[in-house]
Amino acid sequence: MALARAKAQAVSVRHAGGVVIGADQILDCGGVWFDKPADIEAARAHLRNLRGRSHRLVCAVAVLRDGAECWHHVESARLTMRDFSDRFLENYLRGGGAEILESVGAYRLEGSGAQLFSVVDGDYFTVLGLPLLPLLAFLREDGILMT
């Protein structure tokens, strides 16, 4: 939540009167937090650590108006990676390109990363990095979006 707030705060101070949305996501696997991989070697290490195991993605979103928080929400999803082969891993890394480095888990569920999983339990949008449905509900309740 602190990172989501900080992201929104950094933008909010430059946009008086605007509504600013900030979000951030962490991956927790067995008490170990994963950051976005710095390079393909780090992505390989991430995926080897996650292979055959369950992990939790925790996503926070904060809405600020004139620098003040008016709403926040935290949601999580549990994902289980299948026990894929090293051959599959190397093929995935070759085909994934730089975009896998943009994700905390070195995968994008909306693309070829879906093949890494045996179970996804939770909101799809939370996995993508933004608990969209609760956010949209707030924006409608607050009159920012039409009901």
Image (tube, rainbow, N blue to C red):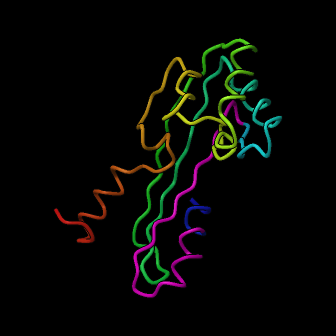
Measured as percent of width and height from the top left, residue 86 is found at 76, 15
Measured as percent of width and height from the top left, residue 91 is found at 70, 21
Q: Is residue 17 magenta?
A: yes
At 46% from the left and 46% from the top, the residue drawn is: 75
Count of numbered circles on the image:
0
Q: Residue furthest bottom?
A: 16
At 53% from the left and 17% from the top, the residue drawn is: 118
Measured as percent of width and height from the top left, residue 71 is found at 40, 66
Q: Residue furthest right?
A: 41
Camera-side residue of 91 and 15:
91
Asked if residue 22 lies left or right of residue 97, the reply is left
Q: Quadrant of residue 82?
A: top right
Instruction: Please state the extent of the stretch shown in magenta in the rendering.
Output: 7-31
Q: Is residue 51 magenta?
A: no
At 33% from the left and 49% from the top, the residue drawn is: 133
Image height check: is 120 above or below 73? above
Which quadrant would the C terminus be assigned to in this image? bottom left
Asked if residue 114 lies left or right of residue 139, the reply is right
Asked if residue 106 lies left or right of residue 108, the reply is right
At 46% from the left and 43% from the top, the residue drawn is: 126
Image height check: is 122 above or below 39? above
Camera-side residue of 106 and 3:
106
Q: Residue furthest left?
A: 147
Measured as percent of width and height from the top left, residue 65 is found at 42, 79
Camera-side residue of 86 and 29:
86
Which quadrant would the N terminus be assigned to in this image? bottom right
Image height check: is 11 above or below 41? below
